[in-house]
Amino acid sequence: MRHVTPSGREAFFPASELIVSKTDTKGRLTYANRLFCDLAGYREAELIGKPHNIIRHPEMPRAVFKLLWDAVQQGREIFAYVKNMTRVGDHYWVFAHVTPSFDGAGRVVGYHSNRRAPDRSVLEGTIIPLYADILRTERSHANGKDALSAGGRALSDFVASRKASYDELMFSLQSAA
């Protein structure tokens, strides 16, 4: 993958539309809908087989992705706010609903994600400041494992301060919008 520098420009997509993608259990894309391709700036053929993190924005805390991956690998769905990056370095925010896909024997065989446009007030009032704090915490550690652990604690402490589980907090933020 080539290195892309964030541009600082934000891209948007209609609130009435969904970004949809599917991956295998290793996070490699197996499907990307037209909106995903158009917004990210890639042709479908350039995405299929590539790691989903091809669109990962460097300002996205690692702890949030760890929480997300831990949930779906355990067979649970999860909701999360995510900042993604386009091919040219622009960013776009999504409210993602990620679910595991199961085979007939109940084994996880991949993941499905539907993403919608998030409410700006939730982003600006809660998510952007929270993620900036977590990212600062992560970046204050030279060791990657320590950084991830510290970021996870910062996220966990924030959720606990709201006296809710992570899932309850995500639903309350989205429903309050």
Image (spheres, grey):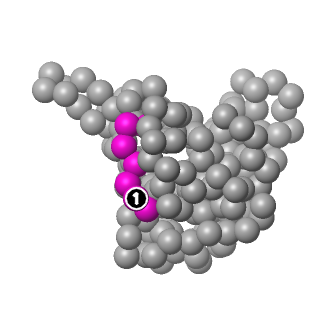
Residue 71 rendering spot, x and y as whole percentages = 42, 36
Choose between 1 and 152: the one closer to the eye: 1
- Residue 6 in view of the camera: yes
16 over 85 or under it: above or below? below
Residue 175 location (% of width, % of height): 41, 72
Is 139 covered by the magenta stretch? no
Question: At which x and y percent is residue 157?
Answer: 64, 47
Relative side of 68 to 9, left or right: left
Across and down, in percent, residue 105 comes to 15, 22
Above or below: residue 56 compared with residue 121 = above
Q: Left or right of 100: which side holds 84?
A: right
Q: Report the residue that reaches farthest toward the left.
A: 104
Label 1 Cα neighbours within 10 Å, binned few <14 / some 14-19 / many ≥20: some
Q: Residue at x 36, y 43 (%)?
A: 31
Q: Tell me the element at label 1.
A: helix
What residue sits 24% from the left and 23% below the top?
107
Q: Which residues are magenta?
A: 29-35
**Who's the residue at 38% across and 64% down the image?**
18
Residue topped by disc 1: 34
Q: Is residue 34 magenta?
A: yes
